Amino acid sequence: MPNSSSISEFLLLALADTRQLQLLHFWLLLGIYLAALLGNGLISTAVACDHRLHTPMYFFLLNLALLDLGCISTTLPKAMANALWHTRHISYAGCAAQVFFFLFVFSVEYSLLTVMSYDRYVAMCKPLHYGTLLGSRACATMAAAAWGTGLLYALLHTADTFSLPLCQGNAVDQLFCEIAQILKLSCSKSDYLSEVGIIYFSLCLICGCFVFILFSYVQIFRAVLRMPSEQGRHKAFSMCLPHLAVVSLFVSTLMFAYVKPSSISSPSLDLLVSFLYSVVPPAVNPLIYGLRNQELKAAVSKTYIFNIHKMHASLTGVSR
């Protein structure tokens, strides 16, 4: 049996057996990828260019959009290339890079989602202290802490995973290189249990953050329901519910992927769940945040119209 030192590449899961279905999957993934790039790109551009959106909430939303771009760009391009070129191969270094960037993006994103719940809590429950508790320096510090701890976590977790001796082949039954699938290739029981322990510790941290988020929203909803103005309540819910929806989708799919009983595990179910927590959130987050946020929709429309006019002026100048 091969060990980790002799493995130079891994084999990802083939999405289809026939060439026609492979091409269909390629175009489907390409459409999702382009939609995610467009949505998150528009949000990032609108927040960066519109000075009215230079507030803590939109600062964190900008970070979230950039992370969503990184997340979907880590997983889909290789899957699309494999479907297009009728192959399953990914190099050892490429697999390690996928694991690292995926862990990095996910850990930072979840940290920022937790910080965003604190931002909403202070805005709704302690509005007089908002400028003090969430000034520009405090926001930059919290964002830097999220990115820094995410980088450290991803480095340590990736190094620990790929230090395992692998002797169960090189087939990864997944759309991308995922830690749970890499662990199945390990031939060291003690090292495997050590890495599983790290995963469950990470899930405990996720649960702890989720409890904090839920507690924050209990306080937020209590404050919102006490508002005398129906318009004020509607605006408050429009700002808070999208964030709660994103967190719920993120946590529920991720927890199901790693905590579900082995008796119901199957390659098709694992693929579906991984698709739900790695591909769907980056693609639908712009819709979730944009559909109920009038300020953001106005800024995106303004940015889009400005870019169209700029392009038209450029093309007119070239034609002259």
Image (cartoon, rainbow, N blue to C red):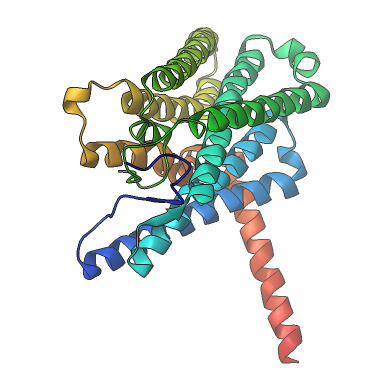
Residue 292 in the image, given as x and y percentages of width and height: 49, 37
Side (left or right) of 159 relative to 186: right
Residue 21 in the image, given as x and y percentages of width and height: 23, 64
- When the figure is inspected, residue 310 is found, relative to residue 69, above or below; the finding is below
Residue 64 in the image, given as x and y percentages of width and height: 59, 37
Q: Nearer the viewer, residue 228 or 27?
A: 27
Tag count: 0
Q: Nearer the viewer, residue 20 or 38?
A: 20
Q: Name which residue lies at 66% across and 24% down.
A: 149
Q: Name which residue lies at 27% across and 55% down.
A: 15
Q: Name which residue lies at 79% across and 18% down.
A: 131
Q: Name which residue lies at 54% across and 26% down.
A: 110
Residue 3 in the image, given as x and y percentages of width and height: 41, 39
**What quarter of the picture does the C terminus occupy?**
bottom right
**What quarter of the picture does the N terminus occupy?**
top left
The extreme left residue here reads 263
Q: Nearer the viewer, residue 59 or 193?
A: 193
Side (left or right) of 280 relative to 305: left
Side (left or right) of 4 relative to 170: right
Q: Quadrant of residue 22?
A: bottom left
